[in-house]
Amino acid sequence: MSTFDEDLFKKGLEQRKATLGAEYVEKNLAAADDFTRPFQEAMTAWCWGFGWGDDVIPAKTRSMMNLSMIGALGKMHEWEIHCKGAINNGVTPEEIRAIIHVVGIYCGVPQALECFRVAKKVLAETAE
């Protein structure tokens, strides 16, 4: 029995790959085992199929929202992944900087410094 909607999963998988890169997504799904696979499938369907699966908000804007929210939560591993995805979705370095400024205002300077540290790493990697 499946724990997710197959159509949402397919839509989500397409969006997830478009944002985070097919190689990254396929690696995550391949690494899933019996314990983690249900979550990977449900997250792909729910987050990427349902949450990202309509045309109401452009992918670039969703990426900017994600950087703000994940930055506020201080989940830097996820922030790094979504920073790469944001660049894939057309977010510029200047827009990333402005997002980090807002994170600093509402979440504190230490969190903004963490975001800058990770953003510099991601931007250096994408420039290569």
Image: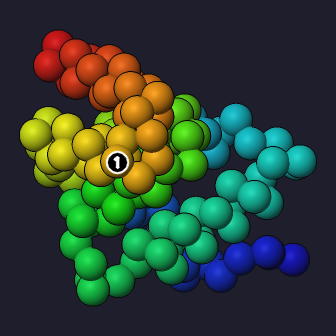
In the foreground, 60 or 9? 60
On screen, residue 103 versus residue 13, left or right, reads left
Element under label 1?
Answer: helix
Residue drawn at x 38%, y 26% is 113
Q: Which residue is mark 1?
A: 105
On screen, residue 96 versus residue 18, left or right, reads left
Answer with the quarter of the image where residue 66 lies.
bottom left
Vertically, is 127 above or below 66?
above
Q: Position of residue 86 (x, y in %)?
A: 28, 48
Q: Quadrant of the N terminus?
A: bottom right
Q: Quadrant of the C terminus?
A: top left
Residue drawn at x 48%, y 62% is 13
Vertically, is 111 above or below 10?
above
Q: Amino acid at mark 1?
A: Ile
Query: Can residue 80 be seen here?
Result: no
Residue drawn at x 27%, y 20% is 120
Q: Position of residue 70 (x, y in %)?
A: 49, 50
Q: Position of residue 84 (x, y in %)?
A: 32, 37
Q: Position of residue 67 (x, y in %)?
A: 38, 50
Residue drawn at x 63%, y 45% is 29
Vertically, is 62 above or below 35?
below
Mark 1, Cα crowd under 10 Å, few <14 / some 14-19 / many 20+, is few
